Amino acid sequence: MPTISTVLATFVDPMEGMRVTSVTDSGIAVSFDTLNGEGAGTAASPTETVLAALAACTAMDVASILRKKRQWVDRYQVSVRATRADENPTVFTSIVVEHQVSGEVSAEALRRSIELSATAYCPVSAMLSASVPIEHRYRIRQEGDADVADSTLVVATGPNPR
């Protein structure tokens, strides 16, 4: 049987500003705002939180898989960069997700973990991939090493992936 999720969004002050607080099924409150128009920029915008959700979802998947593979991670960050359309609706037209890892991690274990997240586990990635191309990349950083110019492509998902 399908799971049903419900979120209640309430304008903080319907007559002023753009701040909205949403409460999830689990009772967690999430605030939103915008710098555009009447917003004061007191919270992340809805589109920023979509990218944050993608970063968090894939990071949780990959960290869990790496732990199961007994890979030792000292530091792990996920950077998400998106390009948006110029005209309304200003939807995402491309997204690049880069996993930046340091520690005793094999490139193959990291690559496979990212591939599984991108193609099988992360529902946020799956939903976005239905409408926008997403590149999933990684960069392994070791203590004292200079930055590598390019990250390594793992997989491209979505319609017409690059």
Image (spheres, grey):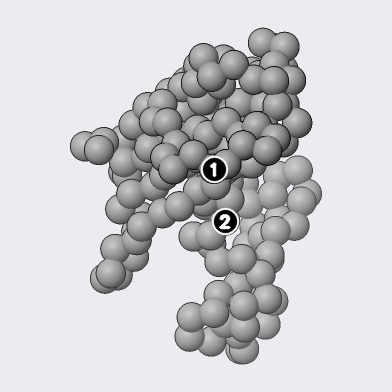
Q: Is residue 126 visible?
A: no
The residue labelled by disc 1 is: 147
Quadrant for the C terminus in the image? top left
x then y, percent, for residue 88: 29, 70
Outermost residue to the top: 69
Q: CA distance from mark 1 to mark 2?
A: 28 Å
Quarter of the rendering occupied by the N terminus: top right
Residue nearest the observer in this picture, 129 or 114: 114
Q: Is residue 91 left or right of residue 32?
A: left
Q: Earlier in the sequence, mark 1 or mark 2?
A: 2
Q: Relative to residue 55, is residue 68 depicted above or below?
A: above
Residue 142: image quadrant is top right
Query: In the image, 93: left or right of 31?
Result: left
Q: How far from the left and from the top, in percent, is residue 85?
A: 29, 63
Q: How many neighbours does mark 2 have within 10 angstroms: few (below 14), some (14-19), or many (20 or more)?
A: some
Q: Which residue is mark 2?
A: 49
Question: Which is nearer the eye, 78 or 152?
Answer: 152
Q: Residue at x 54, y 43 (%)?
A: 147
Q: Is residue 161 above or below residue 64?
A: below
Question: What's the amino acid at mark 1?
Answer: Asp
Q: Is residue 155 visible?
A: yes
- Residue 93 position, x and y percent, is 30, 53
Please, what secondary structure does the residue beneath circle 2 have?
A: helix
In the picture, measured across the screen, residue 58 lies left or right of residue 43, that is: left
Task: Kindly identify the residue that appears in the image at 44 percent across and 43 percent down.
Answer: 149
Relative to 53, is 85 on the left or the right?
left
| Residue type (three-letter) at the residue carrying disc 2 | Thr
Which numbered mark, 1 or 2, is in the foreground of this view? 1
